[in-house]
Image: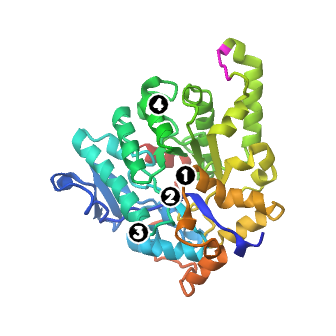
Amino acid sequence: MHADDLILISVDDHLVEPPTMFDAHLPAKYKGGAPKVVRDAQGNDVWTFNGAIIPNIGLNAVAGRPKSEYGTEPTAFEEMRPGCYDIHERIKDMNAGGVLGSMCFPSFPGFAGRLFAVCDDADLKLAVTQAYNDWHIDEWAGTYPGRFIPMALPIIWDPELCAQEIRRVAAKGCHSITFTENPAALGYPSFHDAHWDPVWQACCDNDVVVSVHLGSSGRLVVTAPDAPMDVMITLQPMNICQAAADLLWSRIPKHFPDIRIALSEGGTGWIPYFLDRLDRTYDMHHLWTGQNFGDQLPSDVFRKHFLTCFISDPVGIRLRDMIGVDNMAWECDYPHSDSSWPNAPEELAAVAKDVPDDELNKISFENAARWYHFDPFLHRTREQSTVKALRAEAAGHDVSIRSMDQGRFERKVMTAGEMASRATA
């Protein structure tokens, strides 16, 4: 399929929250304790909440920057493309990149809302989390219907409250909740504990997907404190591999047969070996470990419950029959450093040049729409949704690579250990 003819829904993008996000969504009595953006002495824009300071890390907002300027130093809003934080500019960037739909993970609260969860004021942290969800659903996703798959933060510190929030956001049309890939790393019971049962039941009852993003526990795979950053970046999919094993062997698929779990930003090329390893482990060891999937193999359970995604994964594309074409989805990862925006359609078309159109349609948009109960064609025709049509709407929008003034910052090459320490702070 030619790049112009693709229809693209990305199941993993990101947003940088704007400073005004809580203004219209947080009750007045909580606004004194609300998260705020301040500019520090170095000129960085940072979020502050509950005594914590959270910078916007450079690698998280480098769309439109030359690769030579990628880095981990904090940034200010004027150093980012406005599409990182401005919904109207985001739509322009999506159109220019040929992307019809997008699901955007959070930034400063953490992928599972762990920044809010550690607040001692129970009423405040609940109000802030719900305000975040209302902003995301009503304002970020709601401003342009049919362009965004809404996503909610969990009430991760209380499973009963979390179940209530899942039901609340589902009633607003939200069918994705972001969750940690390892709750035990955050001090909560593991996936193997019945503690989380109200959450899984609420997801099943309301057709809500548990979207698990790598790094959401604050733990990154690091071999040594002085390992170069390249080691951590290379091993990022291993975070998702670990989560997939934990979830597959947990009680969750057995007790909640309708549960659906998305593995975000983990790639797909590793999955065929993973599935083979699951089945061999089961065959060789289930009689003494006590695992029992009835007449199914673990690989069957995986294909029933898990959605996987990739940015550019030629190995996964070649092995798609072993993974399951119905279990694969595409992601753009805008505005992170792995994203190929605005040339993602050309990249995908080149990688998938030998894939039949019906299979590529599943991977590029149909699976995402089905999993997340998302129908963009309620708002525009299929002919208006192709890469070519969207780019025509963005005619004249500047997508050129622009160098930013680095004079305010002294570039620092961080080790993987330093980055991991920052992630867990």
Cβ–Cβ under 8 Å for marks 3 and 2: no
Q: Mark 2 sits on what residue?
A: 149
Q: Is residue 356 above or below residue 207?
A: below
Whole-angstrom CA distance, mark 1 to mark 2, is: 7 Å
Please tell me which residue lies in front, 15 or 200.
Answer: 200
The label on residue 372 is 1
Q: Is residue 286 visible?
A: yes
Amino acid under disc 2: Ile
Q: Are marks 1 and 4 in contact (CB under 8 Å)?
A: no
Magenta span covers which residues? 289-293
Looking at the picture, how far across and down is residue 337, in whole percent?
57, 62
Q: Badge 3 is on which residue? A: 143
Element at badge 1? Answer: loop
> x and y percent of residue 363 in the render?
69, 56
Indicate which disc, 2 or 4, sits on the residue closer to the N terminus: 2
Circle 4 crowding by C-alpha within 10 Å: few under 14, some 14–19, many from 20: few
Q: Nearer the viewer, mark 3 or mark 4?
A: 3
Describe the element under mark 4 as helix, strand or loop.
helix
Circle 2 — which element? loop
Residue corresponding to mark 4:
184
Membership of 291 in magenta stretch:
yes
- Mark 2 to mark 4: distance in Å? 28 Å
CA gap between label 3 and label 4 equals 36 Å
- In the figure, residue 39 lies in which quadrant? bottom left
Q: Mark 1 and 2 residues: CB-CB less than 8 Å, in contact?
A: yes
Q: Quadrant of residue 8?
A: bottom right
Q: Nearer the viewer, mark 2 or mark 4?
A: 2
Identity of the residue drawn at 37% across and 64% down: 139
Q: Is residue 146 above or below residue 202?
A: below
